[in-house]
Amino acid sequence: MQAYCVKCRTKREIKNPKNITMKNGKPATQGVCPVCGTKMFRIGKG
């Protein structure tokens, strides 16, 4: 799954993706950028 990396300013493949649930109950995916190590976040089922 891909997400936008704010630091690299490009879409990259998520490293170590985890399915989480946001406070409002919607699903999301959280992981790490493989290049810079910044947290990445994508809303919606993956």
Image: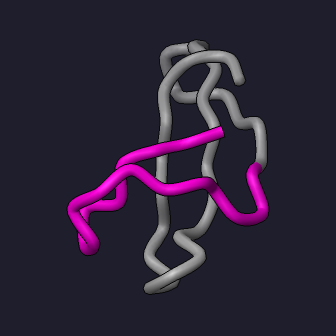
Judge whether 14 appears above or below 2 on screen.
below
Q: Quadrant of the C terminus?
A: top right
Number of numbered discs on residues? 0
At horizontal 70% and vertical 64% (from top left) the residue drawn is 15
At horizontal 49% and vertical 16% (from top left) the residue drawn is 24
The image quarter in which residue 19 lies: top right
At horizontal 66% and vertical 28% (from top left) the residue drawn is 21
Judge whether 40 appears above or below 4 on screen.
below
Q: In which quarter of the image is the N terminus?
A: top right
As for residue 8 lying within the magenta part, the answer is yes
Judge whether 45 appears above or below 19 on screen.
above
At horizontal 63% and vertical 55% (from top left) the residue drawn is 14
Judge by depth and name the residue closer to the eye, 42 or 3.
3
| Residue 13 image position (x, y, % from top left) | 60, 54
As for residue 11 lying within the magenta part, the answer is yes
Main SS class of the magenta portion in the image:
strand
| Residue 4 image position (x, y, % from top left) | 36, 48
Judge by depth and name the residue closer to the eye, 44 or 22.
44
Seen in the image, is 36 located left or right of residue 22?
left
| Residue 2 image position (x, y, % from top left) | 55, 42
Seen in the image, is 29 located left or right of residue 38?
right
Q: What stretch is highlighted in magenta?
A: 1-17
Judge by depth and name the residue closer to the eye, 12 or 21.
12
Judge whether 43 appears above or below 20 on screen.
above
| Residue 28 image position (x, y, % from top left) | 60, 29
- Indicate the colouring scheme: one colour
